[in-house]
Structures are given as C-alpha cells and as structure tokens.
Amino acid sequence: MPNHDSLSRSSVQDLLCKLISIPSVNPTVAPEEPYGEKTIAEFAHSWLQAHSVTARLEEAAPGRPNVYAEVGSGNGPTLCLCAHLDTVGTSGMTISPFEPRVAGNKVYGRGSYDMKGGVAAIMSAAAVIAADSNIRGKLILALVVDEEYASIGADDFVKKHKADACILVEPSEQKIILGHKGFVWAEITTKGRAAHGSRWDIGVSAIGKMSRIIVAFEEFDRRVLRKRVHPLVGPASMHCALIQGGSGISTYAPECTLKVERRTIPGEKPEDAVRELEEVIRSAGEEVDVNCSFHRPSLLCDRDEPVVRHLRAAAQSVTGVQPEEAGVAFWMDAAVFAEAGIPTVNYGSSGAGAHEAVEWVDLDSVVSVAQVMVETTRRFCK
C-alpha cells in the first residue's frame, strides 16, 4: 500500500466529525429545519485555505454557496473531485443527528454516509496533494449544494468550470460506479364537469378519468418497463407518486392532478418517456397532455476512459484488490458533469442509513477513499 503519512485516520475522523456537527439540511427538502448549506460551505472554505488549498465560495443561489478549490500548476490534465454538502432532514432520527458518535469503526450522524464521508475524503486528499505532491496538471474540488433536490449547485459549477474528468464520491462500498438511472417528473391533469352529487346525468368525475389512467400506468410499468433492462442499472420503471382532486364529497370532481416519476435507463431520452406516457393515456381512452416538470439524464461512463483506468489502478494499489465495477438505480450529480462533456465516474465509501433514522459511515473506508483519490490524482494529473 502506498505511504500516506500526511493522511492519518485520526485527521480524517476529526474532519468528518466536524462536518457532521455542522447542520446542512437542504432547505427545500426540509424547510422546517432552518439550516441550509452556508455554514458548512464557509467551514470547508476556511479549512481548505488553512491547509494550503486555494478555495473560494461561489453562490449557486442566494445564501447557498458552492466551494471551489484547486491545487496544482494547471500545465496538464485537470481532474475534478465532487461531493455534495447538503443532507436530507432529521425527522425520525433516534439519536442526536448533529452530535457525531464514534463506535468502533462506525461514525454516526446525519450525513455521515450521504455524504459527508465523501466530503471529508476529498478535502483530505486535496490537503495531501497540496502538502507533498507536485502535480503537473490541476486538481479541483466541487463541494456543491442542493444535490438532494434539484442539483442547482452542480448545474452552477459546470457552467463556471471545466475539467478533463470528474470523480464523484457518493457512497458505493468502494465499487467503481459506471452508470446510474435518470428520471422524469411528469404531471397529468384530467378535467371533469362539476355537478351536484345527485346529478349523475350531467356530472363527470375527473377522478374517475384519472383512475383509468392510473390502471394503465401500473400495467405499463409491470408489463413493459420492467422488461426494459440495462445490464448496469437494471430495469426502467415508473410510479404514481402524488394525486389531488375534487372539491367536496357531494360534488363531481371538476379536476384531478397526478404526479408520476419515470426512472430512465441509459439510452432513454426524457422526450421519448413523455411521449410513451401520452400513448399509454390514449390507450386508456383519455386525451390528456403530459407536462414534464423536471428531468435529469442517466449516466453511462466507458470503462476504458482514462479516468476509470487510473481510478481502477489506484484503487487496486491502495486496497490490494481489483475494485468491482457496477451501476446503481438511483440518480446522482455525476450525470450533470457528464452532460457538460466531462467523463465522470463514481467511487465512494461504505456504510448504511442514507435518509434513514440511523445513519453511519465506515471510517476505514473513508480513509481508503481519500487515499485512492490521492493516488488517482497523481496518476491522472502527472
């Protein structure tokens, strides 16, 4: 295993615990928890500067700053390491969410696994590179806001900065993640005719219309989408997520709105997914437009990309074993970087409890990820 004297387990643990102790709940996901990402961004900015890493705050939205950092001369390839600063809310947590607790090799607290372990790993790696490595190229850090909702942080970052490759460090059990799903959020509204509940002769229920669409969507998901399988990320899918309609129990519903989420696999385009939904609606005997309110692309990274080859070699050098290569069903900011033309892959720590009542990260895996990021940087940016 390579020598990383300046990257000690205790220093990584100390940084990780400080990060966990700073609440950074996404204000859109949990508006009842008045924290946001500003305080943790300011801490990360100060910590990096104190460790000889050039850093600055860049507002992605008012009061919601990303942290940009860089090390190196820039006379060679540029590698970006990315992690998000925000977490989900703390409702239902059984222990104090912002008081980090270390038990053996596990570090508990909100965001420990998703993904302050990753933040600690790449901040530590940058400090090592700044202290004892002369790289010809450049290492940049993207510590971004809002991954847990709309990824305004990643969107803003790729508009301002370029790189030759990017590695996200979302938790992955130290597997190299080459692909993930995308998604489409769509809204369908049916119209009825309001009438007194006794006037079956003129009343038309928009909810009744929507029920036929829901049945058709469920059948489409089961019979068509689940058979459309990508070898890395699994099947396409969709689900009916939210529904609202009606104005009173004794009134035929004049309107009903359904919100659905369609999970896409590599090769599927958002506009094609919307078109399919409209076809399913017509098959149910209804004529209703599908409004796409938001969408994100899937990710697929070629395993022969230079960044993947260097990451694979670095991981084997640090851990002594060949890393597994896989895909995941969930979405991450990797696709934002890839869509900006930056080859992007993911490699992160181990643990459990993302978005759950009990969350923890494996400390040794965080240290290992930091070491792998150091080695990958040295190889890629030489």
Image (cartoon, helix red, strand yellow):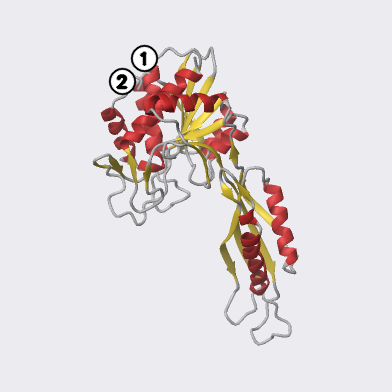
Viewer-proximal residue among 69 and 182: 182
Q: Residue furthest bottom?
A: 198
Three-letter amino acid code at disc 2? Answer: Ser
Task: Identify residue for label 2.
Answer: 6
Q: Bin the neighbour count of mark 1 within 10 Å (Cα to Cα): few under 14, some 14-19, many 20 and up.
A: few
Q: Residue at x 28, y 49 (%)?
A: 96
Three-letter amino acid code at disc 1? Answer: Asp
Q: Which of marks 2 and 1 is nearer the N terminus?
A: 2
Above or below for 127 versus 282: above
Which percent across, then down, holds residue 269?
A: 68, 45
Q: Bin the neighbour count of mark 2 within 10 Å (Cα to Cα): few under 14, some 14-19, many 20 and up.
A: some
Quarter holding residue 123: top left
Viewer-proximal residue among 29 and 61: 29
Which percent across, then down, holds residue 300?
A: 60, 37
- Report if residue 70 is visible in the image: no
Which percent across, then down, holds residue 82?
A: 48, 32
Above or below for 25 versus 174: below
Contact (CB < 8 A) between labels 2 and 1? Answer: yes
Relative to 154, 18 lies left or right: left
Quarter holding residue 124: top left
Task: Give the structural element (helix, strand or loop) at label 2.
Answer: loop
Task: Identify residue for label 1.
Answer: 132
Q: Distance between the residues labelled 2 and 1?
A: 8 Å
Q: Which residue lies furthest to the front in this view?
A: 321
Q: In which quarter of the image is the N terminus?
A: top left
